[in-house]
Image (spheres, grey):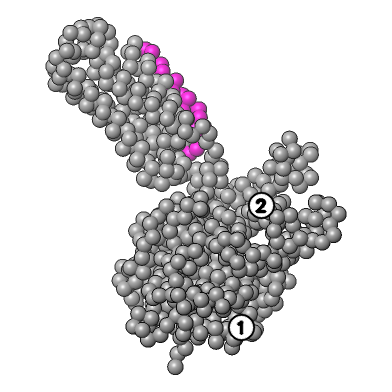
């Protein structure tokens, strides 16, 4: 007979709804399993049986209610010790709850305990825990994966029905694969990180461990949603992620990353299982074609510059002054800081802090960290291109099956290679297709995220650093409005028929400018500023030679736009940004044309005479005016599309080789740039 602790959450929920069992009985089954196997598996750092019994007694049924859960020991829980697997936080008891647990607790979840993990989530085997290694429940001599190995082992062993972990470079998907359960890394920001002890803030993803995909969808629905306490939280409404589970996979576009199958260190059996999964998809009606992520080969190197750099910054707070471990008998503050960190941090954490501090030091920031961020942008681009063709990407999670305990602890580089297939998705953050895919796959299927959004890489990461964004954008919009309306209302004094001619000439001003920028886009990013300047000068010359008020005044507005078109694309690199800008242009042109028609039908116009607006009843004239305004809108459309394409082309270039420059005098002391600024 199957024990309650071995059932899935949705099976238990069905039994609860029928009255066949109770939350207390489910918890009792899990605690009995803990008593039977925990001494050998060692999945938990802290067990909370008394609290769990209280929660089970008050739990209802439905969703996450009454279902036992385990939390990786990096989630703060009020009144319950939270160590992050480190000695430096051994005495730490948080005064508040993390948002994921707040939501699960409100839904009626039952907390079994806090699970073991690599120290500060830095590792791939859970052997870097400061307390003890966790063992794989299926083979106790092997690792469960990491860094969330305790959570994976707890679910696989039946000590908990499901669990939460964190995925920074594969720390949920890899242990899920090695323990034979389902690991889901959602899009960055879909689950709040508030109350999560940080490793690398731009890479940490709160993620889930479950026994099947339906449970993964249920647990994600319970913890996802916008959180005002987390500035990186996505402003998306909570939805039912299991809504399409019965639709099957017929018509699903699956891309298989064939080039990953032959990588060095890849076990033949792993590649064979992935190809079997692809054949299964075909048999079920999906289409499977080869896919490529051209820059993924650089992702591992980029990750081990970005993650240690952020780790170096985040872990600077552990100094023995505010909370956590505090070294005894320190002579002064400097001695206190050094001894506290020396005693509290393990070897792997120290290794990454040193690496990150070096990458951020003066003279090496641009050579290492800056280049790594450029690689990250290229990886984001690769995923976007892949999602244009496919709904999901099929690939191995780990290059090998679970390896023996101690097999890689003496070789950190071989341990780092365990994450070679999972790191690219963390760098991308979850950049996915516009079409929502159907979730019908196991732990080795990387599903496209629930929504399409740009990667959270700053402009500086791609090498572009615009300044004065708000002022320039508003000045540009104002300049465009002035240019369009002047094109509608201006006329050459003493020549009534020149009213439409002046607008046409103003269109000629925008025409060469747009064509010049289009030529710049076709020729690549080089000499861009020179072409812009030449186009502005050409527009000004045409305006002066025409002796037309509109063309004399319009070129300055056009020149304002030269430095601001990038800022007008206010939604970053997304195609919809261009559409929004073009829509704004059409609105302005339409407003100008409408005002022109109104003045031409106003009988008071005739009283103004030749010194004011020339109001003729000739229909052809105002038609010409409307056409001229359309030419204006088209010209600015060319400008916008050209620069948007030019930006994509620039971001699509391969990064330059990473070469450290020789530090200038006074820079080689390892002091960070930020520290130099503070000192100055």
Residue shown at 63% from the left, 49% from the top: 369
Answer whether labels 2 and 1 touch (C-beta < 8 Å): no
**How far across and how far down the image is residue 601, in percent?**
15, 19
Neighbor class of circle 1 (other Cα within 10 Å; few <14, some 14-19, many 20+) is many
Q: Quadrant where the N terminus lies? A: bottom left
* Res. 336 mark: none
Q: Name above or below for residue 214 compared with residue 306.
A: below
Residue shown at 69% from the left, 66% from the top: 91
Q: Nearer the viewer, residue 450 or 229?
A: 229
Q: Nearer the viewer, residue 413 or 567?
A: 567
**In the rendered structure, which disc, 2 or 1, sits on the residue that comes first in sequence?**
1
Secondary structure under the numbered disc 1 in the rendered image: helix
> In the image, 630: left or right of 350?
left
Secondary structure under the numbered disc 2 in the rendered image: helix
Which residue in the protein does label 2 denote?
313
Tell me, yes or no, whether the highlighted magenta stretch contains residue 38: no
Q: Which residues are magenta?
A: 524-545
Q: Name above or below for residue 25 compared with residue 79.
A: below
Neighbor class of circle 2 (other Cα within 10 Å; few <14, some 14-19, many 20+) is some
Q: How many marks?
A: 2
* Res. 38 mark: 1
CA gap, disc 2 and disc 1: 35 Å
Question: Between tags 2 and 1, which lies in front?
Answer: 1
**How far across and how far down the image is residue 426, in percent?**
53, 60
Tell me, yes or no, whether the highlighted magenta stretch contains residue 526: yes
């Amino acid at each position: 007979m199957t024990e309650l602790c071995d059932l899935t959450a949705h099976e238990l929920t069905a039994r609860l709804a029928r009255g066949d069992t109770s939350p207390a009985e489910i918890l009792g089954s899990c605690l009995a399993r803990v008593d039977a196997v925990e001494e050998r598996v060692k999945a938990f750092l802290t067990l909370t049986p008394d609290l769990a019994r209280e929660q089970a007694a008050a739990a209802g049924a439905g969703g996450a209610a009454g279902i036992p859960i385990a939390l990786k020991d990096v989630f703060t829980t009020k009144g319950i010790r939270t160590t992050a697997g480190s000695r430096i936080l051994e005495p730490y008891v948080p005064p508040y709850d993390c948002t994921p647990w707040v939501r699960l607790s409100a839904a009626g979840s039952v907390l079994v305990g806090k699970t073991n993990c690599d120290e500060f989530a830095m590792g791939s085997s859970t052997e870097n825990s400061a307390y003890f290694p966790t063992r794989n429940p299926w083979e106790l001599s092997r690792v469960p994966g990491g860094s969330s190995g305790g959570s994976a082992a707890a679910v696989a062993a039946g000590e908990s029905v499901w669990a939460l972990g964190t995925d920074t470079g594969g720390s949920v998907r890899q242990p899920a694969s090695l323990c034979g359960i389902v690991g889901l890394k959602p899009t960055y920001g879909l689950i709040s990180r508030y109350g999560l002890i940080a490793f690398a803030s731009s890479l940490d993803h709160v993620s889930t461990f479950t026994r099947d995909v339906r449970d993964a969808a249920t647990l994600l629905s319970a913890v996802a949603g916008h959180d005002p306490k987390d500035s990186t939280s996505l402003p998306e409404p909570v939805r039912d992620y299991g809504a399409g589970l019965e639709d099957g996979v017929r018509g699903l576009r699956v891309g298989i990353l064939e080039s990953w199958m032959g990588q060095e260190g890849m076990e033949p059996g792993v590649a064979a299982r992935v190809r079997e999964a692809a054949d299964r998809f075909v048999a079920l009606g999906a289409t499977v074609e080869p896919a490529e992520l051209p820059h993924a080969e650089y992702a591992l190197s980029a990750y081990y510059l970005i993650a240690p750099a952020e780790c170096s910054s985040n872990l600077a707070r552990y100094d023995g002054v505010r909370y956590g471990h505090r070294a005894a008998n320190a002579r002064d503050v400097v001695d206190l800081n050094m001894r506290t960190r020396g005693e509290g941090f393990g070897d792997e954490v120290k290794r990454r802090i040193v690496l990150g501090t070096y990458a951020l030091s003066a003279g090496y920031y641009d050579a290492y960290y800056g280049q790594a961020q450029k690689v990250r942008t290229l990886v984001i681009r690769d995923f976007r291109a892949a999602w244009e063709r496919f709904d999901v990407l099929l690939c191995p999670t780990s290059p090998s099956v679970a390896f023996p305990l101690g097999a890689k602890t003496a070789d950190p580089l071989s341990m780092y290679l365990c994450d070679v297939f999972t790191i690219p998705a963390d760098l991308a953050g979850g950049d996915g297709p516009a079409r929502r895919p159907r979730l019908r796959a196991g732990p080795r299927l990387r599903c496209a995220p629930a929504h399409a959004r740009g990667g959270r890489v700053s402009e500086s990461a791609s090498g572009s650093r615009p300044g004065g964004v708000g002022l320039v954008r508003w000045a540009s919009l104002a300049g465009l409005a002035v240019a369009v309306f002047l094109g509608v209302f201006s006329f050459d004094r003493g020549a009534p028929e020149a009213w439409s001619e002046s607008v046409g000439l103003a269109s000629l001003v925008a025409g060469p400018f747009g064509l010049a920028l289009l030529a710049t886009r076709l020729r690549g990013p080089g000499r861009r500023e020179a072409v812009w300047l030449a186009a502005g000068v050409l527009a000004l010359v045409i305006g002066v030679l025409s002796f037309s008020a509109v063309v004399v005044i319009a070129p300055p507005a056009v020149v304002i736009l030269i430095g601001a078109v990038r800022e007008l694309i206010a939604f970053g690199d997304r195609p919809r940004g261009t559409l929004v800008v073009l829509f704004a242009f059409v609105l302005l042109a339409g407003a100008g044309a409408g005002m022109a028609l109104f003045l031409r039908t106003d009988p008071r116009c005739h009283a103004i005479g030749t010194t004011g607006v020339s109001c003729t009843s000739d229909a052809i004239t105002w038609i010409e005016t409307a056409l001229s305004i359309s030419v204006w809108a088209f010209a600015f459309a060319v400008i916008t599309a050209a620069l948007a394409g030019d930006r994509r082309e620039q971001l699509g270039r391969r990064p330059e080789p990473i070469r450290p420059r020789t530090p200038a005098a006074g820079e080689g002391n390892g002091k960070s740039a930020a520290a130099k600024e503070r000192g100055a």
